[in-house]
Amino acid sequence: MIGALWRSPARWLAGLLLLAACQSPSADDDALELTPLAGPALHEVLTTHTLARSGGTLWQAWDYVSLHRSDGSTSSGSMTGRVAWSGEEQVGHGTWELTPDGLYCRTWANEWGGGKRGCFRVAGAPQMIVFDYVSGSRGNAEHYVYRLVPGNPYGL
């Protein structure tokens, strides 16, 4: 009986739309209370979490993760990022630093961001961090929202 309901393309589409409507909405970072992050607090978040985000379309979805390592100071280090899509993967390496005026700046050693330095203001909420473009190379967006994943579960 239930199988017969799904034989009609219109019913199948209606069911799919109903299922999508029942899904939990993604967090809207504008509706959350974001706390500015800089200095030691930002260093702690960056070096104890993997940053993760996903995007794209149903046909070309991608996942990105990055790990920040400290160089022994409380304001700079190295980073590794990995983007994966459709069975392919690209890995990049670079450096990051926290400036005295409260910015996070990064430079990738590959074509990401044109290999140029880009600086961002950073804010956070539980399990989330937001980077807003300020100067230099912005990469492919002016606003980045990442999930904070404790540790390095992706083996970067």
Image (tube, grey):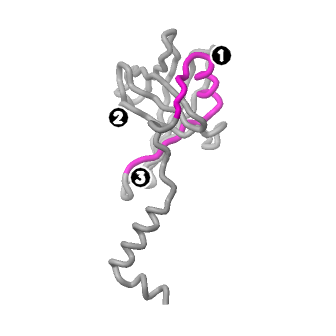
- Amino acid, disc 2: Asn
In the image, 67: left or right of 29?
right
Q: Which residue is mark 2?
A: 140
Q: Quadrant of the C terminus?
A: top right
Q: Secondary structure at mark 3?
A: strand
Please identify, in this view, whether the residue under mark 1 or under mark 3 is nearer the observer: 3
x 51%, y 27%: residue: 123
Tell me the magenta residue range: 33-56
Q: Position of residue 30 (x, y in %)?
A: 44, 36
- Is there a contact, CB below 8 Å, between mark 2 and mark 1? no
Reply above or below: 58 against 137: below
Q: CA distance from mark 2 to mark 3?
A: 16 Å
Q: What residue is pinned by disc 3?
A: 61
Query: x, y (%) of residue 68?
Result: 57, 28
Q: Earlier in the sequence, mark 2 or mark 1?
A: 1
Q: Quadrant of residue 132?
A: top left
Residue in the foreground of this view, choosing between 81 and 45: 45
Q: Is residue 16 above or below residue 124?
A: below
- 13 over 93 or under it: above or below: below
User: Of residues 111 and 58, which is closer to you in this image?
Assistant: 58
Q: Which residue is mark 1?
A: 72
Residues at marks 1 and 3, CA–CA distance in whole angstroms:
36 Å
Residue sitting at the far top: 100
Q: Position of residue 59 (x, y in %)?
A: 36, 58
